[in-house]
Amino acid sequence: MFLAILLSIILIYFVYNFYVRYGPYGRLISRVPGPSGFPIIGNILILQGSQEELWKFFISLHKRYYPNWKIWGFHTSLVSISHPDDFEVIKKNFILFLYN
């Protein structure tokens, strides 16, 4: 019984993760360049370390993927933009996503 409940929870988690990564929101975020991550956990493993290492990592992402980049972590994404015009494009696409 316990095993069936555990397997059901794992299956629901995988389906939810698939929806988040490949659903409408995930397809919108996947257009932004960034490092490839592992399935489900995304880029969480490369975010371990001190604050200085994390800052250097973000600077290297900015240099490599300028002007915009993204990283994933489980069901959350972080998008960094460097120009206000890029924010306008993201905002318009997100509003269209919300109302469609």
Image (spheres, grey):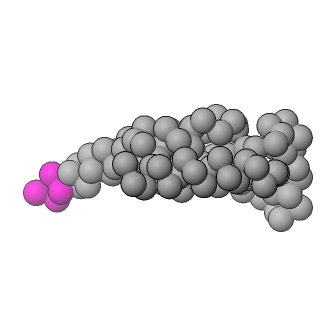
Looking at the image, which is closer to me, 49 or 70?
70
| Picture quadrant where residue 52 is located | bottom right
Looking at the image, which is closer to me, 53 or 21?
21
Quick check: 47 left or right of 90? Answer: right
Looking at the image, which is closer to me, 34 or 14?
34
In the rendered view, tell whether residue 51 sits above or below residue 56. Answer: below
| Image coordinates for residue 89, horizontal then vertical, percent | 65, 47
Residue beneath the point at 76% across and 44% down: 68
Quick check: 75 left or right of 92? Answer: left
Residue beneath the point at 83% across and 40% down: 66
Quick check: 74 left or right of 67? Answer: left
Looking at the image, which is closer to me, 50 or 70?
70
Is residue 16 in the magenta section? Answer: no
Mark yes or no: residue 25 visible. yes
- For the record, the magenta segment spans 1-5
| Image coordinates for residue 2, horizontal then vertical, percent | 16, 59
The N terminus - image quarter: bottom left
Residue beneath the point at 27% across and 50% down: 12
| Image coordinates for residue 76, horizontal then vertical, percent | 54, 56
| Image coordinates for residue 6, horizontal then vertical, percent | 24, 55
Is residue 2 in the magenta section? Answer: yes
Q: Residue furthest bottom?
A: 51
Q: Main secondary structure of the magenta part?
A: helix
